[in-house]
Image (tube, rainbow, N blue to C red):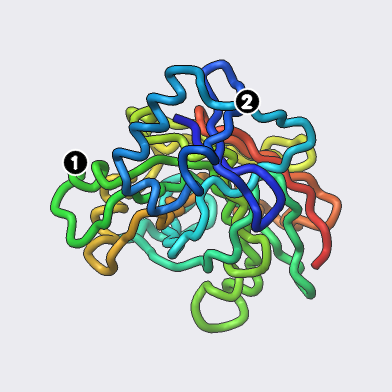
Amino acid sequence: MKLLRVGTAGAERPALLDQDGTLRDLSGLVPDIDGALLADEAALDRIRAAAASGELPVVDSTGLRTGPPVGRIGKIVCIGLNYHDHARETGADIPGEPIIFFKAPDTVVGPDDTVLVPRKSVKTDWEVELAVVIGRTARYLDSAEEALAHVAGYAVSHDVSEREFQIERGGQWDKGKNCETFNPLGPWLVTADEVPDPQALSLKLSVNGERKQNGTTAEQIFPVAEVVRYVSQFMTLYPGDVINTGTPAGVALGQPEPKPYLRAGDVVELEIEGLGRQRQELKNA
């Protein structure tokens, strides 16, 4: 299934994109697309049955905003330097274990919402990423198979980063990762049954129509199953939590000088195979 949330920011309602590309209203069945729903297999089965019957009301999508596909996210766990080609382009060593950092849930916006360039920023960068959404409480998972069984689905994530704040201002990476609007998510949450191999997805990103990233999740150093298993050794993952699994080569940080960092007026477009597309125009904060 392709689950999504539509409407004005803070007042989104649950919806489904059916096999014909028609938007269907889920608000008569469930209150929202969130961790409570993703953990409730009976409720998900009701959605599947209603979708198959064709009884769900059609939603007129004209002028309708698409919000983040998951509401009330508890935490966003991010994996740094998780693509072989990205590590090569930035001259970084291949990490021996996954590098973990966090983004606050309030960085999440819709897939086509405005992204704000922070005040005094000179190095705002792009990163297309595969997001993993957790569907079952995960603690101390033992195997790749067990880890994948805890995944509710996948989505497109844009891990926007301010490299000066991240690297040159002291401390950890948080200052460059948690600026306002720095995590567009969606358009859809695609349930795991529709993604048979998360290591066989293409990722693309363009800036002002020029292709910058053209990668594949096959290049991940730590694949999705290992990332979920590993993270569960250090923290409990709850339904609705999100893991951003890293970005392939092609970010501004890895380009020769002068590096083409983002500015107000730029337009970023990104997509992941089968998971949909995003488009953001940048403005000054």
Q: Which mark is residue 145?
A: 1
Q: Amino acid at mark 1?
A: Glu
From the viewer's perspective, is residue 121 above or below residue 68? below
Q: Secondary structure at mark 2?
A: loop
From the viewer's perspective, is residue 135 above or below residue 99? above
Answer few, some or many: residues within 10 Å of disc 1's Cα (few below 14, many 20 plus, some between 14 and 19): few
Please state the horizontal and vertical placement of residue 187, each as a whole percent of the image.
59, 39
User: Which residue occupies 42% across, 58% down?
Assistant: 79
The answer to whether residue 140 is left or right of residue 121 is left
Answer few, some or many: residues within 10 Å of disc 2's Cα (few below 14, many 20 plus, some between 14 and 19): some
Q: Amino acid at mark 2?
A: Val
Question: In front here: 170 or 270?
Answer: 270
Q: The N terminus is located in which quarter? A: top left
Q: Quadrant of residue 277?
A: top right
Q: Say whether marks 2 and 1 touch (CB < 8 Å).
A: no
Please state the horizontal and vertical placement of residue 250, each as a whole percent of the image.
60, 45
Question: In front here: 262 or 106?
Answer: 106
User: Which residue occupies 49% across, 32% down?
Assistant: 2
Question: In front here: 106 or 59?
Answer: 59
The answer to whether residue 170 is left or right of residue 94 is right
Q: Which residue is mark 2?
A: 58
Please state the horizontal and vertical placement of residue 52, each as a whole percent of the image.
43, 19
Q: Quadrant of residue 170?
A: bottom right
